[in-house]
Image (spheres, grey):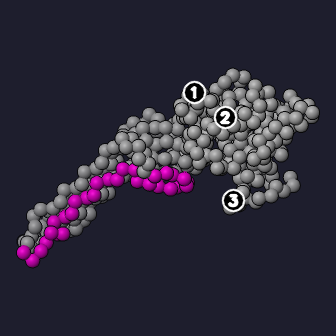
Amino acid sequence: MSQGSNFVDYVKICCRSGQGGAGSAHLHRDKLTAKGGPDGGDGGRGGHVIVKGNAQLWTLLHLKFRKHVIAGPGDSGGSSLRTGKTGQDEILEVPLGTIAKNAETDEILFEITKDGETQILTPGGRGGLGNWHFKSPTQQTPRFAQPGESGQEQWNILELKLLADVGLVGFPNAGKSTLLSVVSAAKPEIADYAFTTLVPNLGIVAYRNNRSFVMADIPGIIEGASQGKGLGIRFLRHIERNSVLLFMIPADTNRTIKEEYEILLNELEQYNPELIHKPRVLAITKGDLLDDELQQEMKAELPADIPSVFISSVAQKGITELKDMLWKEINVSPQVGKSESPEEE
């Protein structure tokens, strides 16, 4: 199975929670008691359908073919005030960054961002009350109890938005996959044609003093991606979760660097205006094609509002400088366990 078919970031699942157990209408009887009072216990709660975060997962592939999830029913209450057993919960493990939605209303129910975090997707029915709850001065021996509450059945959507420190933004063939393969152990498919990257690739980038950050290669944007052209809109959602956006523009582009940068920025703004407020870094790729004079000319035309660097993944040029820039931007708001200044290797 290819990597393309292994990456699943959207599943639609029918979830049915368990019915609550019925309460018991038992009356106490033993060899010493011929006409005892009510002692029927409550029914057990029906099983929930629960979503749980798992930091070891990167895709929803394991849920792709699981169209129906059915939790167990609760048991009925028993005599001597015994409560029925709770129904078996169904737990769906998902990668961090997964959003749960109601498929009919598109309402966002919750989002899983921490390892081990659990949320109830479809709650089980409550167990019915046993007859002892209904005892009163005027009704000493109620011979009835509550039935259990029905479970719920609903279609839900689980949608993954990748959590990464750095998201790569650029047109097809900007050199994003090549950079990721050079700075991390990720092995994305690389070839000289548009849309080679059909799925997001994640790589752990080693930094100074055994520190690291996560980089995501998002499939290339084309003009009109925000309107759903090409592969665009399906992957733009992954960019929403990246702390820093690394714009990548090849030195041999047909437009000027500034023009291409403006187009990329416009696509992001059309899709979600909040994206343009994220920290940004500009890398001009294929820098090995430029001599010093040409590089200086291009430098004068670069956008002034963004830190930039000329790199060549193939020649390993500017890679350390780029990592330093990214680390600094990731830590503009200092995070736990990461220092702001690059230290000597």
**Magenta stretch containing residue 120, yes or no?**
yes
Q: Report the amino acid beneath label 2.
A: Ile
Residue drawn at point x = 64 percent, y = 26 percent: 195
Measured along the vertical axis of the image, is residue 287 above or below residue 52? Answer: above
Q: Residue furthest bottom?
A: 137
Secondary structure at numbered mark 1: loop
Q: Could you tell which of marks 2 and 3 lies nearer the N-terminus?
A: 2
Disc 2 from disc 1: Cα separation: 16 Å
Which residue was labeled with disc 3? 333
Q: Residue furthest top?
A: 193
Residue drawn at point x = 72 percent, y = 57 percent: 332
Disc 2 from disc 3: Cα separation: 28 Å
> As drawn, is 36 to the left or to the right of 264?
left
Measured along the vertical axis of the image, is residue 112 above or below residue 234? Answer: below
Secondary structure at numbered mark 3: loop
> As drawn, is 276 to the left or to the right of 252?
left
Residue drawn at point x = 85 percent, y = 39 percent: 300
Secondary structure at numbered mark 2: helix
User: Can residue 43 be spotted in the picture?
Assistant: yes
> As drawn, is 44 to the left or to the right of 314?
left
Which residue was labeled with disc 1? 230
Residue 267: percent from left, percent from top? 61, 36
Which residue was labeled with disc 2? 263
Q: Are marks 1 and 3 in contact (CB under 8 Å)?
A: no
Q: Could you tell which of marks 1 and 3 lies nearer the N-terminus?
A: 1
Residue 181: percent from left, percent from top? 74, 35
Q: Report the amino acid beneath label 1.
A: Gly
Query: What range is drawn magenta here?
Result: 110-138
Badge 2: how crowded within 10 Å, few (<14), some, or many (20+)?
some
Residue drawn at point x = 88 percent, y = 35 percent: 297
Disc 1 from disc 3: Cα separation: 35 Å
